[in-house]
Amino acid sequence: MTGSVVVIGASLAGVSTARALRGHGFDGEITVIGAEEHEPYDRPPLSKALLAGRAEAADLALVSADEDLRVRMILGRRATGLRPGDRTVLLDDESSVTADAVVVATGARPRTIPLPSPGRGVHVLRSLDDARRLAADLRPGARLVVIGGGFIGCEVAATSRGLGLDVTIVEAALKPLAGALGPEVADGLMRLHREQGIRVECGVGVTAIRGSDRPTGVVLGDGRELAADVVLLAVGAVPETGWLRGSGVALAPDGSVACDAQCRTTVPSVFAVGDVASAEHRFLGGPARVEHWSNAVENADVAAAALLGLPGGMVGDNPPYFWSDQYNHRLQLAGRPSPGDTLTLVDGELTGVGFAGRYERTTAAGVVTTAVVALDRPRPFAHLRRGLVSRSAGRRAS
């Protein structure tokens, strides 16, 4: 199989697409374009091992020295437009790349909030350069305020506490992570943070970040001010799709690329994978944007097979899966719980050192397992996850 493919995005989803194309026998030209100047790297360690100084950038490489993907890499260039008629990608240096097929894997950028604030000492975390800038400010005894109690915020809070910082998490929701994990598991996770000496302020927003050159404090919506030397904005991510305006590629309401269960967009021979894509998801039963490591890899294989016209899987053949390492604990979840689901424990206790359980929902057809979760229980979790995957396979076969 020959021809040419251009992949926009040199992170996990983009590199995995190139790898999947080769794995499916594609022998044509592959060009991968990345906005960063760095060689492709893995992002999960940015908030943990790299931030803590336990890993170097070289340890994060997505392509090993002995792996020959036969890919032309164009790094340090951003896509500025797509000409759909001849599948030409326009770049910010006024050059362009034309190919037989295009794969959009531009991921997302950190969401920001319009707050008065000093420039230095206020951080986001998405890239290797972001992590390096943040790490330089994480000095023992410094006061860190993390705005946003999602997974990135909690991981950075845990890493920073281990480095000897005074840490406060500020979360506008009444229960951080309750939407992703349900109230019981979210409460247990926050209890771990409080036991480590982290303060958690819930149900309150932020109105300003004080300071002229560097932060001195964070003003909360109720008028209180928290002392701060360093601030992290961890309030989510926005799909990186502005460059697609006018291309004919349809976007979902959240700005992600709308595509079918084989990662096809509304423009022929243009596909989307990873964090940037909102695909028809078989397990979740509709369009969904899934920002997980495993989803990026699975999307890439689905898109590569579809692009080459080969039989292959579909997005959501497997339940969504992610993990989060905080302190010496590992949280794992497969599936997606919804408000009103009941958590049933099968191992351990929520107030103990670990647990495993499943989320269940009562439907007209009976009790359905929607997700499984564990903290420091890898074997029970693996068993529960296999059951969830089997249910998904059974539903596909029916």
Image (spheres, rainbow, N blue to C red):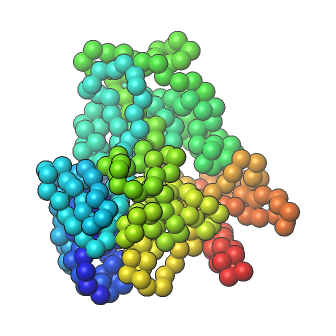
Q: Position of residue 10 (x, y in %)?
A: 28, 60
Instruction: Give the image quarter of residue 230.
Output: top left
Which quadrant of the rendered structure holds the N terminus?
bottom left
Q: Is residue 121 above or below residue 220?
A: below
Choose top left, top right, bottom left or bottom right for residue 2. bottom left
Q: Can residue 66 be seen in the rendering of this structure? A: no
| Residue drawn 52% across the image and 37% down it | 149
- Image quadrant holding the C terminus, namely bottom right
Horizontally, is 309 left or right of 229 in the view?
right
Point 13% across, 50% down: residue: 93
Looking at the picture, does residue 128 appear above or below residue 394? above
Quarter-of-image position of residue 138: top left
Of 228 and 260, which appears nearest the observer? 260
- The answer to whether 118 is drawn above or below residue 385 in the figure is above
Instruction: Give x and y (percent) for residue 46.
Output: 34, 50
Count of all numbered marks drawn on residues in the image: 0
Residue 128 in the image, given as x and y percentages of width and height: 27, 49
Depth check: give the residue in front, 262 or 351: 262
Q: Is residue 150 left or right of residue 41?
A: right
Position of residue 228 measured from the top left corner of the image (x, y, whole percent)? 38, 22
Which residue lies at the image location 56% right of the left edge and 57% below the top edge? 288
Is residue 171 or residue 103 the one in the foreground? 103
Q: Can I make out residue 272 in this image?
A: yes
Q: Height in image: 60 above or below 212?
A: below
